[in-house]
Amino acid sequence: MTDNDQQFEYSEFSGEFIDDDVTVILRIYRPAVLKVCDEEGNTTVWNYPFDTDREAFEEFLATVQRDGIRSFLDEPVQKLY
């Protein structure tokens, strides 16, 4: 099976997240991949997989707490390592 053939399943942690009047769409796929999209279509993607979707969600929350929700609006496309 190639990467293009791989099926992704959305985690129950996926969904809309609102903080400080900013809305982002949180996408966590299984296997645990984390992607955040803002209202303008800008995307932040973590370039490493997480062991679980819960760990991906906790990383998202830690990023919001540490850097603020507006950090996802800073760049059109961000890749976090």
Image (tube, helix red, strand yellow):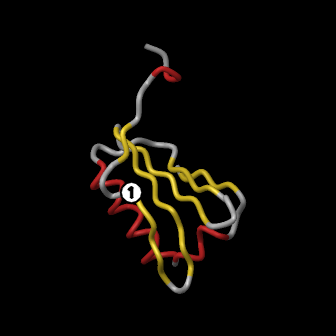
Q: Looking at the picture, does residue 34 appear above or below residue 40?
A: above
Residue sitting nearer the eye, 9 or 60:
9
Tell me residue 72's x, y (percent).
59, 67
Residue depicted at 42% across the width and 61% down the height: 15
Q: Looking at the picture, does residue 35 appear above or below residue 58?
A: above
Residue sitting nearer the eye, 6 or 48:
6
Residue 38 location, quadrant? bottom right
Tell me residue 32's x, y (percent).
36, 43
Which quarter of the rendered picture does the N terminus lie within?
Answer: top left
Residue depicted at 58% across the width and 59% down the height: 37
**Pointer 1: what residue?**
14
Residue sitting nearer the eye, 10 or 73:
10
Residue 12 appears left or right of 40: left
> Extreme right residue here?
76
Tell me residue 52's x, y (percent).
27, 46
Q: Looking at the picture, does residue 9 appear above or below residue 2?
A: below
Residue depicted at 46% across the width and 59% down the height: 26
> Which amino acid type is marked by label 1?
Ser
Crowding near pointer 1: few (<14 within 10 Å), some, many (20+)?
some
Residue 40 location, quadrant? bottom right
Residue depicted at 50% across the width and 52% down the height: 35
Q: Looking at the picture, does residue 8 appear above or below residue 47?
A: above
SS type, badge 1: loop
